Amino acid sequence: MYIIVRPQRSYGPVQSAIAVLNLLSLLVGMILLFVGTFVYFAPAAIFVTSTLLPHLILVLGATISLVSFLGYYGVMNEKRWILWVHGLILLIAIALQITVGAIAFVYRNQGTEVLDDAWDRVFRSDPHVILDLESFFQCCGFEHVLDRPVPITCAIDRRYTAGCRENIQTAFQDSLQAIGVIGAILGGIELVSLLGAAVLFHRFDKQRYQREREDGEESLVRALLDAQQVDRHIEQSRLQRERQLQYEVLAGQVRAQTLARAQQEGLLNEDLGSGSGTGSGLARDPPPYGTFDSSSRKPKNSRNGGH
């Protein structure tokens, strides 16, 4: 019976740091999903939904959440193929992030024109959106209370005296700035996570090679131990056979000695029998059955002899 004990899995500092970074990246991805959802469904969303910005934010948030989860799972369970997929999706996420940052930068410099065009388009197609927007920002019209308000008597009915452009532009720029800050933080986390994933990929490759070598050595040790057990069984069988042969030889010797002793005793009896014929005075053997010995004749009865 033999037991080969392997060391338990331990997580190094690099592996633990990459796992923490993936958790932070997952948190940022969920924040991006929240921001994208807010930008898409908020009252001011009409000013950016005509562009790809909210869609890219949602896609980026979902991608970052997925890749962060894959990265954390692959790092903690040492799955090389998951780390490979993690690195590939990270590259795609970085490309999307650069695209979102470029679009946000472009529309940040052209905020007034974009907002004016969006207000005019919504004013013609769906005035109820303008009404909700005015209620949210507590304003009437775009530049001033008479610039395409909904309704025309907005300033009189609600007593709002300011236009909505400044409030909408401030909220729009604040959203873009928040997206930029989150993107910068996320970019740093992604780069570090990508480098860490590459390092861990090569490390796991070496560890896999080492485990395969240890498995080969373990198989060799098991084979050697099995061979030793077989040799011990063969040696025990050989010793048992030798003992059996020794017992058989000893039994043969005892049998031969017994026969020799029996033969010697038989010769002695023959010598004794030949000595009685020379008158040595030793007792003779009785005559065979049915013979008559003259020496043992008894005298006849006188009554029978007289007649």
Image (cartoon, rainbow, N blue to C red):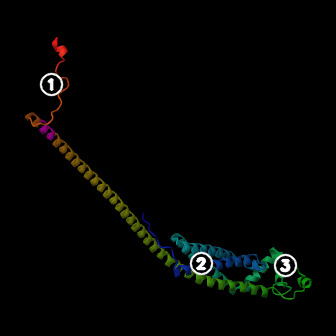
**Considering the image in quadrants, where does the C terminus appear?**
top left
Q: Is residue 270 magenta?
A: yes
Q: Nearer the viewer, mark 3 or mark 2?
A: 2
Q: CA distance from mark 3 to mark 2?
A: 43 Å
25 in relation to 217, above or below: below
Q: Nearer the viewer, residue 53 or 229?
A: 229
Mark sitting earlier along the chain (1/2)? 2
**How many residues crowd mark 3 within 10 Å: few (<14), some (14–19), many (20+)?**
some
Q: Is residue 255 magenta?
A: no
Considering every residue shown, the one lying at the far left of the view is 278
Percent from the top left, x then y, of residue 296?
16, 25
**Which label is found at residue 74?**
none
Residue at 75% from the left image edge and 79% from the top image edge: 47
Q: Nearer the viewer, mark 1 or mark 2?
A: 1
Q: Nearer the viewer, mark 1 or mark 3?
A: 1
| 147 with respect to 202 (left or right) | right
**Which label is found at residue 22?**
2
Instruction: Report which residue position mark 1 lands on.
Output: 293
Q: Is residue 265 visible?
A: yes
Write down the region rendered in magenta: 267-273
Instruction: Report which residue position mark 3 lands on.
Output: 131
Mark sitting earlier along the chain (1/3)? 3
Task: Describe the element under mark 2 as helix, strand or loop.
Answer: helix
**Considering the image in quadrants, where does the N terminus appear?**
bottom left
Percent from the top left, x then y, of residue 128?
84, 75
- Give the residue type that dot 1 points to: Asp
